[in-house]
Structure formats: structure tokens, C-alpha cells
Amino acid sequence: MQRNLGIAATAALLCGLGTCDLGAKAQAQDVVTTVSVSNRNAFPVLVKRIGLKDDDQAVAEVAANDSVSFNDIPFSSGQVFVAFRLDGSNECIGAQAISIQTASQNRVTLIVSEKSIGAALAPKGGRPGGNGRPPGNPNNGDVFARNLGIHYRPIRQADGTFTARITRAPEAGTPAAQVGFEPGDEIFAMDDLPFREPKDVLEHTMQTTIDFIDVRTKERRRATVELP
């Protein structure tokens, strides 16, 4: 066990993060779950999965503004996910530890940004975050899209379409939170279809592509999500 714990710690040290606190005590029965990876960068990334056993290792390349999944991962102990840039620099972006307790209770989406990798958690069972209408002022001009879990303000365009400008941080565990949307991001199409009426935002289910403008970089990006 000491040698295997060293593997996880080494993965974190590669990114200058120090040792990871896995919080992972083995349980009597393995937890099997899927961990999704959402790359929010305009460049591809490489994500390595390193477990506490020699055979708990895998590698996946994630294209720019795309998503992949590590399917049916056996969590008999903790896992560490390490992300690297694939833009020629091969620079380490960061590391994220997932404990067996976290995996047993949540669906996990890893969000890879330019300088970090983090975990968005959605409780297992039912719709992520409930996807009901959260409390708020219905007269402030915001519209709530229950499938995404966002409040947005329609910004009308000259061609009669509108963009959906997100007005507050998404509720934890919703598809929008898993993508990592922030207030100010503007969604301008879903499944390559622009918006003309609010119902156009709602009429998307299952695997859906979302085209948006990143408020931080002002770049157009694409994400893929699973909608209820």
C-alpha cells in the first residue's frame, strides 16, 4: 500500500500541488461509477487516471471544448486524475483526487480549465440538483431553463434570434454547473440551432451540444452535456 500511495502523491507533485488528501479508506465492496471530463480550453488535453492499485490506470485525450468519460471505474480506493496540455508544451495543468466516498454518493464531472482541474458533483439519484425552479424574483427579467439549470437574460440580435446571457452561478449539480458556466457566459445555440423563443432553450434533451461565448476569454466554445 505504501508504494501505491506514492503513485498518487507523485502524480500530484508533478503538478506542484503537494500530496493529495484522498480521504479514501477501502470499503468492503467496490464502487463502480463513471467520471466525465469536460475540457473548457481551446486546446486539447491529456487526462491520466491513477488509482491506488497498479491496474487502476487509464489515459484519455480530450479535444478542445469537448467531453469524454472514464466508464465503469472500480473505486476500491481513491483515484487521482492529472491533466496535461496537448498544445506542444505538454505542461501539467493540475491534479484532482476523488475519494471512494465521493464516488459512491455522486456523479463526478471533472472541469479542465486553462490552469486547473476541478470536480463538479451531482448527487446520485434523480435529476442533477433537482432542476426545479430555484427561488428568485420572477420580475427581474431573468428566464429559468430547467433542463440546463440556468437563469439567463435574453439578448436580442439583429436577425431576430437571441443569446442567453447567464445571470447567476448555476445551481450545484446541474448540467450547467458541470460545464462550469459562469455569470456573463452567453449561449447562442444548442445542437447548432439558434434561439428565437424561450422554448427553443428548453426543447433539448439527452446528449446536447452547447455553443457559447466564454465571458473570460471572449472566445466561442462548445461543450457537450447530458440533459434530462
Image (tube, rainbow, N blue to C red):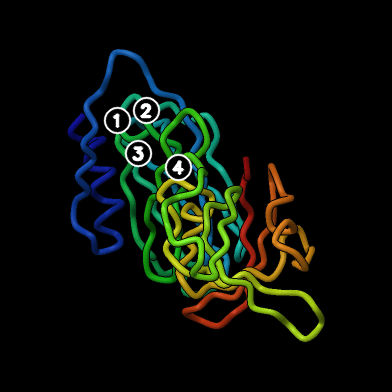
Residue placed at 29% from the left, 36% from the top?
Answer: 99
Please count the marks in the image. Answer: 4
Q: For the residue labelled by badge 4, is the local secondary structure a helix, a strand or a loop?
A: helix
Q: To which quarter of the image does residue 93 belong?
A: bottom left
Residue placed at 27% from the left, 19% from the top?
Answer: 27
Q: Amino acid at mark 3?
A: Gln
Q: Are marks 4 and 3 in contact (CB under 8 Å)?
A: no
Picture layout, residue 128 above or below residue 27: below
**Where residue 47 sits: x, y (%)?**
48, 53
Q: Residue furthest front?
A: 139
Q: Which residue is mark 4?
A: 129
Q: For the residue labelled by badge 3, is the local secondary structure a helix, a strand or a loop?
A: strand
Mark 2 vs mark 3, CA separation in Å: 13 Å
Q: Which residue is mark 2?
A: 104
Task: Please state if 15 lies on the left or on the right of 129 as rendered.
Answer: left
Q: Are marks 2 and 1 in contact (CB under 8 Å)?
A: yes
For residue 101, the mark is 1
**Where residue 87 sits: x, y (%)?**
54, 73
Task: Please state if 15 lies on the left or on the right of 66 as rendered.
Answer: left
Residue 41 can be seen, yes or no? no
Q: Which residue is mark 3?
A: 79
Closer to the N terminus: mark 2 or mark 3? 3
Closer to the N terminus: mark 4 or mark 3? 3
Q: Nearer the viewer, mark 2 or mark 3?
A: 2
Q: Amino acid at mark 2?
A: Ser
Determine crowd level at label 2: few under 14, some 14-19, many 20+ residues with C-alpha closer than 10 A.
Answer: some
Mark 2 vs mark 1, CA separation in Å: 5 Å
